[in-house]
Image: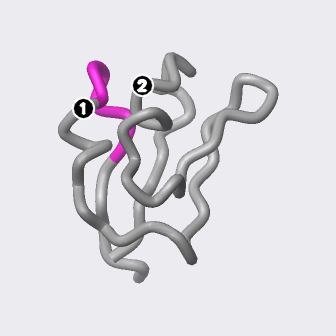
Amino acid sequence: MVLKIDKNKCLSCAGCVSICPKDALTLKNMVLEVDENKCIECDICTRFCPVNALRLTTNL
């Protein structure tokens, strides 16, 4: 699985950044980025996002 960010929906609120247990999410220049090497696919960020801008999906 891979964490995908819908940049059109993301509000750059950084709420997901602060709750990620592995610090896999960062906000750089108001753009959310994910470090796939750190992400453990715990799904916490997807459930926390108020606009559903994050989702776990297959890497196909």
- Gap in Å between the C-alphas at discs 1 and 2? 8 Å
Above or below for 22 versus 31: below
In the image, taking residue 36 as reference, residue 49 lies left or right, namely: left
Q: Nearer the viewer, residue 38 or 60?
A: 38
Q: Position of residue 38 (x, y in %)?
A: 52, 70
Above or below for 41 versus 11: below
Residue pushed farthest left?
47
Instruction: Give the class, few, some or many, for how many residues have Cα within 10 Å of label 1's Cα (few <14, many ≥20).
Output: some
**Image quarter of the C terminus:** bottom left
Q: Nearer the viewer, residue 11 or 44?
A: 44
The residue under the point 24% across, 32% down is 48
The residue under the point 44% across, 67% down is 39
Asked where in the image residue 19 lies, by quadrant, the reply is: top left
Q: Position of residue 1 (x, y in %)?
A: 33, 76
In the image, taking residue 44 as reference, residue 25 lies left or right, namely: right
Above or below for 44 versus 14: below
Q: How many marks?
A: 2
Query: Which three-letter amino acid code belongs to the residue tagged 2?
Result: Gly
The residue under the point 50% across, 17% down is 13
The residue under the point 30% across, 67% down is 41
Which region of the structure is painted magenta? Answer: 49-54
Residue pushed farthest right?
29
Query: Which three-letter amino acid code belongs to the residue tagged 1?
Result: Phe
- The secondary structure type at the circle numbered 2 is helix
For label 2, the residue is: 15
Q: How would you classify the magenta stretch by its main secondary structure? A: loop
- The secondary structure type at the circle numbered 1 is helix
N-terminal label among 1 and 2: 2
- Are the two marked residues, 1 and 2, in contact with CB atoms closer than 8 angstroms? yes
For label 1, the residue is: 48
Instruction: Give the class, few, some or many, for how many residues have Cα within 10 Å of label 2's Cα (few <14, many ≥20).
Output: some
Above or below for 36 versus 44: below
